[in-house]
Image (cartoon, rainbow, N blue to C red):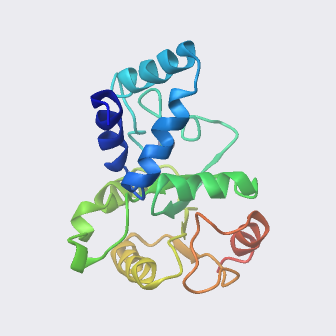
Amino acid sequence: MSNKFQKLIDFFTKLPGIGPRQAMRLVLAMAEWPKNELDEFSQSVNTLKDGPIFCAECFNFADSEKCAICTSIKRDQTRIAVVEKVTDLQSMENTGAFNGAYHVLGGHINPANGSLPANLKISELKERIQKLKKMTPDIEVIIATNPNTYGETTALYLEQELAPLEVKITRLARGLAAGSSVEYADEITLANALKHRR
Ligand SMILES: [Zn+2]
């Protein structure tokens, strides 16, 4: 194997869910790209860490300090959907059924994996709610973690942590089958789970 190929394959295998075989397929596919596309690709990689990557408010992807959702006057900033990952946020956005804001935790609680509450953006969420409460008492936090063991654990922990803040807390309705995920739920199911949250 050429060194050029091997080096790229090694990089791709660092990504979640990519094994050596898939990595090789990706590199082979990229070798078919025209030169200018490869240049654009490497340019994107190059600038990935120039400036902010995550929104300082909700931890969505952002090109500046705050993301497009947090700065939009069309979005209801008093409705905050708490999700595990940016990909969950994206799935909820795809439904078009939610007009509020988000808060990306950055994962879920799983002590066996070393993923503890302190690793998640929970204190940031509490601070954010406290700030918002100075402006309006009408705040709803929609806990939209995944309907599996870790998502449930995280949701229960959040409910406890947020209880003293005295804001309305809702959960996605049970349209989502247990063990499924927010990221891969189809748009209609997810939109329904949002609509019937309680
Ligand atoms: Zn944001």
Q: Is residue 12 left or right of residue 78?
A: left
Q: Is residue 132 left or right of residue 140?
A: left
Percent across and percent down for residue 77 are: 58, 49
Is 42 located above or below residue 12 in the figure?
A: above
Is 181 located above or below residue 132 in the figure?
A: below
Relative to the observer, which residue lies in front, 36 or 130?
Answer: 36
Relative to the observer, which residue lies in front, 1 or 50?
Answer: 1
Percent across and percent down for residue 24 are: 43, 44
Is 82 located above or below residue 64 in the figure?
A: below
Percent across and percent down for residue 146 are: 52, 74
Q: Is residue 59 visible?
A: no
Residue at 46% x, 58% y: name it. 85
Residue at 44% x, 26% y: name it. 64
Q: Is residue 88 visible?
A: yes
Residue farthest toward the front in the current orientation of the protein: 1
Rendering quarter of residue 189: bottom right
Residue farthest toward the top in the current orientation of the protein: 36
Residue at 37% x, 29% y: name it. 52
Rendering quarter of residue 187: bottom right
Relative to the observer, which residue lies in front, 176 or 1?
Answer: 1
Percent across and percent down for residue 157 are: 35, 79
Position of the N terminus, as image quadrant, is top left
Residue farthest toward the right in the current orientation of the protein: 188
Position of the C terminus, as image quadrant, is bottom right
Q: How many numbered tags mark residues here? A: 0
Q: Is residue 73 left or right of residue 44?
A: right
Residue at 62% x, 36% y: name it. 72
Q: Is residue 178 left or right of residue 53?
A: right
